[in-house]
Image (spheres, grey):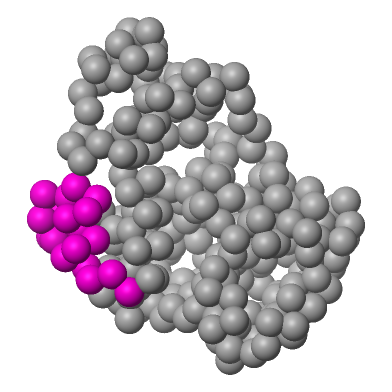
């Protein structure tokens, strides 16, 4: 079960309330800055580096844009909230260096007062309050999150030179209607197929096919938020049919395209 809302005044700010019972996410990224609130149950979070951390009720998790992660129930059901927002909008509102550091990795905070304050700010979004109240609340919240000692923190580094070398490959993966072959992509990069897979994984945290699927679902979210029909979205992104689109979308978003668009 999932409920999505978007601000009238800030359409790039999206909030979600959800209850999940089974493993539902594959490794993915968001093109947005995200703050999560664990309400009940426990879940296992796998972040930018190897290893994992167990999230508990009362935890607040902060995920910078572009950080590969997955989070699934540990045992039974769990309930959580997640707020996604344009990172370019969020960065100028972080008034301290410590708050600004939250935009470069993943941070887990385990303090109930922060959980209550983050929930109160999320309520402003669900209640569709004014831009001024949401922005002011976010500024104050980021100061408190930045000042708190983290339970877990990791900075997700990016090899910019490698990413630049792979840019033609990633563009081909993202923009082609059909999936390019590894052999074709390897020629573009001047690498063997095995070298290419390792290079893409090192640069993005995902294999070439997983990166392509993730990029298509990111675009699908934008199209569906803008009101595009599900069938048109699936066709535009090159999915073979709506059922294929539904399966891939659900594996990344843990909700159907219809529930997300509603």
Indicate left or right for 213 with 78 as reference: left
Q: Which residue does the image show at 59% across and 81% down from the upper left?
A: 9
86, 203: nearer the viewer: 86
- Determine the image quadrant of residue 12: bottom right
Q: Position of residue 5 (x, y in %)?
A: 47, 81
Q: Is residue 170 visible?
A: yes
Q: Is residue 158 above or below residue 120?
A: above
Q: Is residue 114 visible?
A: no
Q: Which residue does the image show at 51% across and 43% down from the upper left?
A: 68
Q: Position of residue 123 (x, y in %)?
A: 62, 86
Quadrant occupied by the N terminus: bottom left
Q: Which residues are magenta?
A: 227-246
133, 156: nearer the viewer: 133
Quadrant occupied by the C terminus: bottom left
Indicate left or right for 243 with 55 as reference: left
Q: Is residue 51 above or below residue 163?
A: below
Q: Which residue does the image show at 40% across and 62% down from the upper left?
A: 222
Q: Is residue 122 above or below residue 154?
A: below
Query: Is residue 188 on the magenta stretch?
Result: no
> For the stretch drawn in magenta, what is the main secondary structure?
helix
Query: Is residue 233 on the magenta stretch?
Result: yes
Q: Which residue does the image show at 74% across and 57% down from the upper left?
A: 91
């Amino acid at each position: 079960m999932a409920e999505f809302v978007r601000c009238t005044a800030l359409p790039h700010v999206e909030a979600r309330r959800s209850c999940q019972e089974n493993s539902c996410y594959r490794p993915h990224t968001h093109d947005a800055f995200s703050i999560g609130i664990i309400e009940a149950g426990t879940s296992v979070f796998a972040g930018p580096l190897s290893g994992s951390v167990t999230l508990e009720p009362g935890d607040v998790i902060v995920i910078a844009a572009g950080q590969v992660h997955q989070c699934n129930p540990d045992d039974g059901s769990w309930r959580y909230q997640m707020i996604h927002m344009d990172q370019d909008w969020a960065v100028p509102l972080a008034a301290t260096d410590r708050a600004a550091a939250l935009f470069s990795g993943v941070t887990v905070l385990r303090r109930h007062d922060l959980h209550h304050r983050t929930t109160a700010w999320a309520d402003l979004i669900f209640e569709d309050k004014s831009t001024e109240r949401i922005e002011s609340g976010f500024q104050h919240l980021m100061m408190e999150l930045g000042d708190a000692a983290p339970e877990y923190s990791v900075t997700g580094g990016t090899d910019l030179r490698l990413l630049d070398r792979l840019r033609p490959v990633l563009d081909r993966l993202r923009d082609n209607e059909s999936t390019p072959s590894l052999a074709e992509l390897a020629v573009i990069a001047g690498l063997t197929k095995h070298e290419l897979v390792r290079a893409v994984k090192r640069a993005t945290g995902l294999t070439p096919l997983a990166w392509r699927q993730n990029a298509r679902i990111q675009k699908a979210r934008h199209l569906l938020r803008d009101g595009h029909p599900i069938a048109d979205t699936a066709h535009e992104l090159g999915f073979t049919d709506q059922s294929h689109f539904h399966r891939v979308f659900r594996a990344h978003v843990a909700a159907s395209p219809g529930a997300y668009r509603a």
